[in-house]
Image (cartoon, grey):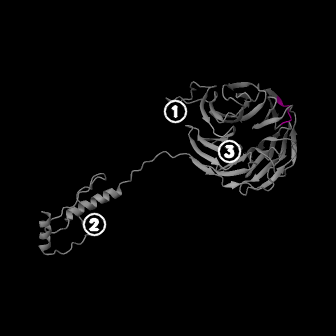
Amino acid sequence: ATRAAIEHRKSSPQQPAMLMQPRDSLSLDRPPLSPCASINQPTVTADSGCPSIDDMDQMISGFSAMSAAPSVENHEPRGPITVSAHQKFSKDNAHAHVITCVCMDGVGGVATGSYDGTVRRWEEGSGECVKAYTGHTDVVTSVVVYGPWLLSGSRDKTVRQWLMRTGSQVGMFEDHRSSVQRIVLADPWLVAGLGNGQIVLHDLTANKASIKIPSGFRTVTAMAAHGDHVYVGGEDGHVRSFSLEGELVDEYLHGHTGAVEAIAVDDQCMWSGGSDGLVRQWELENSPILNPNSELSSEPSKRQGQTPVRLFSIPGGAVKSIMVCRGSFFIAGGNMVVQRRIQGGEVLASYKGHASNVTGIAISEDTHKLYSGSDDCTVLGLSLIHI
């Protein structure tokens, strides 16, 4: 039958080739095919061997519908992002030993403390060391900024006050019987945590006697301030919070199996990081949670208080520093910094570049950059990921 059709076509007179008409001139009175519908094959008549106008109209409508339909993609959840350092601070006039702490200086620079007993300021853009502050006789453990001054705590049992611009020492707090392990600001107080477990509050605005508070720890290993509370971590893995009047407010027990080495706090949660390589997230007693049945209700719901609500493990070693910024918290553990989402706790990014343990982190004023110091004696700048 096929051979007969071919012979018949050869014997038929040749018809002039049909010119394709512009699409606008075609009749499109039928609705286009569904994008998922198959396109009918054109009918070939025995006498012409060409598709009819109706057949071509149906083909064009079908192809048009298919091209206009959005493509369907399988959008799998994106995994964590790995961010490599884009800036390594200059080796000229750099620290000669391990970096212990990092903070922003409030005027476009980064301040660091070190085992070499010095504080140094670095320009963010160039990464050059612009000032060195010398005077401590032992390890600098903490650095904070207060107006035009830098304040540094040291194992030499002092807190020294430096005029940031000139580098000159303008004051010193030395009423400490043990090494200064941590310092934090709780305006107008400078709070020092000591190696003998004592907490000392120095008034920065008036010449008042210091307030001394026993923390209950043998030694203070971590500290943070938020509002009118100071959160103190100790060698036994526990955290206690105190009012600025010296009253014990709460205890966060059964947390870590080693010393607490980092604390961060926001309005609703507190994070503690330990030498056990774990981060625990705690709800704060004084932070009301809205009733889930009414967004307008401010009635506090039942809190979990002293029980950690989340637990995160950090590969690579002890947790040395934690920061909270724009819906994320950042954990310095091992030779990297890990960014996790506060709501959900999933890993968003990992920041890498150091050859050894990261000991301190700070986030720029515009929240675009992360700066990290390390046991490898270097300071790195990394572009921050906002997700």
Q: Residue at x 41, y 50 (%)?
A: 73
Q: Which residues are magenta?
A: 206-211
Q: CA distance from mark 2 to mark 3?
A: 66 Å
Q: Amino acid at mark 1?
A: Glu
Residue 295's disc is 1
Q: Indicate which disc, 1 or 3, sits on the residue closer to the N terminus.
A: 1
Q: Indicate which disc, 1 or 2, sits on the residue closer to the N terminus.
A: 2
Give percent across and percent down for residue 185: 76, 38
Asked whether the viewer can see residue 364, the reply is no
Q: Is residue 273 in the magenta section?
A: no
- Taken as a whole, is the magenta stretch helix, strand or loop? loop
Residue 24's disc is 2
Q: Amino acid at mark 3?
A: Asn
Apparent side of residue 365 relative to residue 14 in the rendered image (left or right): right
The mark tally for this picture is 3
* SS for callout 2: helix
Apparent side of residue 161 relative to residue 18 in the rendered image (left or right): right
**Which of 292 and 248 lies nearest the eye of the viewer?**
248
User: Which residue has dot 3 on it?
Assistant: 335
Q: Indicate which disc, 2 or 3, sits on the residue closer to the N terminus.
A: 2
Quarter location, residue 248: top right
Residue 157's disc is none
* SS for callout 1: loop
Apparent side of residue 170 relative to residue 29 in the rendered image (left or right): right
